[in-house]
Each structure stands twice: as C-alpha cells, then as structure tokens.
Image (cartoon, rainbow, N blue to C red):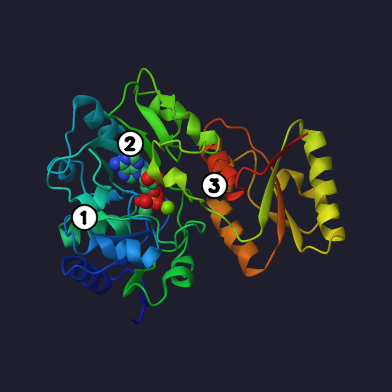
Amino acid sequence: METRVLPPTEEAIAQAAALLQSGELVAFPTETVYGLGANALDPVAVPKIFAAKGRPSDNPLIVHVATPEAAEPLCHVDARAAMLMKRFWPGPLTLLLPKKPTIPDVTNAGLPSVALRMPDHPVALRLLAACGVPVAAPSANTSGRPSPTSAQHVYQDLQGRVPLILDGGICAVGLESTVLDLTVEPPTVVRPGGITVEMLLTVLPQVQVADSVMRPLRKDEKAVSPGMMYRHYAPRGQLTLVKGEANEVRAACRNLYAQAVTEGKKARVLAFEEHLRDYADCNTLSIGSLNRPETIAHELFAALRRMDDEGVDAMFCEAVETKGIGLAIMNRMCRAAAFHVVNV
Ligand code: TXA
Ligand code: MG
C-alpha cells in the first residue's frame, strides 16, 4: 500500500473523510499526539488499527468525537461528565463512561466502559465533522514505540500500512490525553496527561490517581487501563532515571554517563535547559525547561525517537517533580525506562 502524506487542505480532509467512511484508516494530528483512526462503529474497519500497529486486541481504543453532543449516542453522560466536557473539551481529557450498545466490542475490547474524547486540534475537528462518524484512534505509532508527535514519526512507523497521513505539523502538548475513569468512585486518573489532577480538582471535589500510574504492574495484576500492561514509550537503548537531591543527582548522572562511555557505549544525557552547563563534559540533548515543564512534555517523545535514530545505547535523565504536568512526564519516563530508576 502506498502511504500519502498530505497537508490538511479542504481536498485532503475530504479524501480522509471518504477513506474513514469506506472503512479505511487515516492518521491525523491532535493536540496531544497523532492518532490512527477508523470508524469506531465499523467492526470491520477497527481491527485494521490493531493490525497496522501490532497492538494487542485486548487494549481498548479511545473514541474521538466532533462535539460533546456526539458522545450521547455512544455512552451514558451524567451531570458530572457533562460538566467536565463543558470545562475541558475540546482538550486532552478522555473520559471513561458506561458504554451504549452502539459501540462494537472490537472498539473497547468488550468492556462495560468506553473512552471518549473531543480533541483540540483544527485538523482533527474538521476531519471528525467531515466524516460524520465517531473515530476510534490510538496513538499512530507501532505498538511499544514512543507516540508520534509529527507526521514524519507516523510515516517512520506506519509507512505502507496506512493510505493517508494528514500532516498538521508538530503536536502542541506532546503527551497523550489524561484518561479519567468516571465509572468508579471517586473519579480516578488511570493515565495522567495534559489536563492535570490540579485542574480536575477545580471542577471535582475529589480525584484519585491509580497507584499503578507510578509503578510497574505486579505479576498477575489486572491493569485499570489495559494500555499500562504493555512496555510503552520505549526507546531501543536503555534509559536510566536518576532521582534524589538536585546536586547529587547531577553528579550521579555524570558518573553513570562516564561509566557507560568507558564501557564503549554510545551514551547521552537528556538534560533540562537549566542544567546544560552542569553537563558540559557530556554529550547532551536538551529536552526542555524545568521552569516550563510543558516544554519537556512537548519534547520528550521526539527526543526518545531521535535517540533511536542515532543508535544511542544508554541514556540518563534526572527525574522531575510529579506535580502538575510533571506527573504525566514521570509516568511516561518511568515506562520508557522500564522503571530503571537509580535513587541517590
Ligand atoms: O491523546 C490521546 O489520548 C491519543 C490521541 C490520538 O487522542 N490517543 C491515545 O490512545 O493515546 P491509546 O490507545 O494509545 O491510549 C488509550 C489508553 C490506553 O491505555 C487504553 O488502555 C485506555 O486508554 N483505555 C481506552 N479505553 C478504555 C476503557 N474502556 N477502560 C480502561 N482503559 C481504557
Ligand atoms: Mg498509545
């Protein structure tokens, strides 16, 4: 199959909408990461997503809608869900709600709940409006690789497996949406993202964070969000996170880096702008500013992919504080590191 990458002209959006309506796949930009979409109501189209990504079929998909009203035929929207939609949609918040029978089992892995989100990206919204159907879309990467934040990333992973990629430039947020489970009490964040716990608490009296967010699953443990079972966001080399008091962390990072170099490894320190000077004798890649953590979210996946492209074997990075967007950053970093964390 030939894969075309097109800028989001009226004509390209119309072609993409026609592909979705005829049961084909389209990759498209959202404000978080690129998605690989199919008609969520078409039980023949949706399995193509799993095949293209190499994704296990027991991992349910997020259904994207053009408006909050478009969610109503798909799930049961109570007053609390309506309030969250009003406050945070369009935006990087996915809500888990009791599903209606319209959702085929292939889309949500046969679960009683379905994940819904209205993305905050003009191309995604134009596409959803043009095709007139809800669009199931996971991140448009090969399963296990860092999520794509540019059309080039999607092309790298899915070339020959998807007929059309709409190129909407680089994603603003850079990490996937927050997934909030509204089928449990209190509402529980099963995946942290761009809508932070602090933001949710401006609307909800209580929010819980699933404890599996910051640790590996125990053997035989059932995942609250099936996506957390799999090795995720992983670069090919080994990422090591270093945690502890600021100055000691930097010394430890430098030592670990030097040791890796001595062992003949191609090593790199993923450093925050404010700390670049402390790593003057190391090969570094800047991954955003600690003072503006949203820049770290924006850079992270692209940096991990670049390390793959350059064939880096060993990467070292300081842990960040788990407040605000920092919780989502650490959640992804811990998974990318396969929970390889050094405490100093
Ligand atoms: O930002 C995003 O959410 C992106 C863009 C494309 O919208 N999409 C995305 O989809 O990240 P995906 O499939 O890579 O991640 C969806 C996550 C998975 O961890 C999945 O297990 C969980 O949401 N999920 C989806 N439906 C669920 C359900 N009914 N119950 C529990 N977890 C669910
Ligand atoms: Mg994903």
Residue that label 3 marks: 297
| 3D distance between C-alphas at marks 1 and 2 | 22 Å
Q: Secondary structure at mark 2?
A: helix
Query: SS of the residue at dot 1?
Result: loop
- Chain-order first, disc 3 or disc 2: 2
Q: Position of residue 63 (x, y in %)?
A: 26, 49
Q: Nearer the viewer, residue 326 or 125?
A: 326
User: Could you classify mark 2 by the number of other residues whose Cα lies within 10 Å: few (under 14), some (14-19), or many (20 or more)?
Assistant: some
Identify residue for label 1: 40
Q: Residue 181 lies in what quarter of the image?
A: top left
Q: Is residue 131 above or below residue 161?
A: above
Give the residue pinned by disc 2.
Answer: 88
For badge 3, the amino acid type reads Ala
> Looking at the figure, which quarter contains the N terminus?
bottom left
Q: Is residue 181 left or right of residue 321?
A: left
Q: In screen coordinates, is 35 left or right of 85?
A: right
Q: CA distance from mark 3 to mark 1?
A: 28 Å
Q: Is residue 210 above or below residue 73?
A: above
